[in-house]
Image: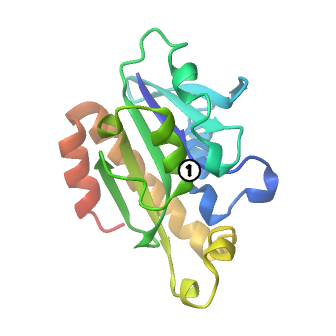
Amino acid sequence: MLFILGLGNPGTKYNRTRHNLGHWFVDLLAKNNRASFKRSQNFEYSRIRHENDLVCLLKSRHFMNENGIGLKRFLHNFPDFTNQLLIVHDELSLPFGRAKLSVGKSAGGHNGVKSVLINMAPQNSIARLRVGIRTSALSTTPIVDFVLSRFSAQDCIELDALYTRLKLSISKLLKEGIQSAMKFTNTSTF
């Protein structure tokens, strides 16, 4: 089973913000599979079928900097857990509309990723789908304000197109493995 952890902050206040891109992705996967989320102490989770594969979608009930709390314990509740964890999150170093899939990278300054890496080991087995959020507005807006800003209506249209490509990345990962998925994702222009 593949576990997809979408990073973000809990609560409607943060919906459609750049920093909640991970929540946006897993929410859409659940919605498009007519699935709902259940609650545990630390996470909201949902099981879906992505094509023929079982996938567990996760959203932390903690704020971004604590997204990794309880993750290891939560995953061990699943007897078929095989260390297949994919983190989906916003990435300031990538332009809006681009995505990169990587394995074994450092947190790169992202505190949500850092929290997951601290709570899960070894780091080299964790895949990350980094989705770009950088726009020209970043040059005139403090980083904290920028990542917590909402997507525009035009951004949302572009995100819908990006979602289709990101789903293909997940399919490649499940069917062909990480190397094939990385090649597809990292060379695709979304």
Question: Who is closer to the viewer here, 174 or 4?
Answer: 4
Q: Amino acid at mark 1?
A: Gly
Vertical placement of 38 versus 85: above or below? above
**Left or right of residue 34, residue 126 in this image:** left
Q: Secondary structure at mark 1?
A: helix
Where residue 132 sits, quadrant-wise, is bottom left
Q: Is there any visible trace of residue 41 in the rendered image?
A: yes
Residue 152 percent coordinates (x, y): 66, 75
Question: Who is closer to the viewer here, 21 or 42?
Answer: 42
**Left or right of residue 104, residue 73 in this image:** right
Screen quadrant of the C terminus:
bottom left
Crowd tier of the residue under label 1, counting other residues whose Cα lies within 10 Å: few below 14, some 14–19, many 20 or above? many
Residue 92 percent coordinates (x, y): 48, 70
User: Mark 1 sits on what residue?
Assistant: 112
Vertical placement of 123 versus 15: above or below? above
Screen quadrant of the N terminus:
top left
Question: Who is closer to the viewer here, 97 or 22?
Answer: 22
Q: Which residue is the extreme one toward the front?
A: 118
**Left or right of residue 164, residue 46 in this image:** right
Where residue 187 sits, quadrant-wise, is bottom left
Q: Residue at x 80, y 52 (%)?
A: 12
Residue 168 percent coordinates (x, y): 35, 47
**Left or right of residue 104, residue 97 in this image:** right
Vertical placement of 137 versus 41: above or below? below
Q: Residue at x 71, y 25 (%)?
A: 38
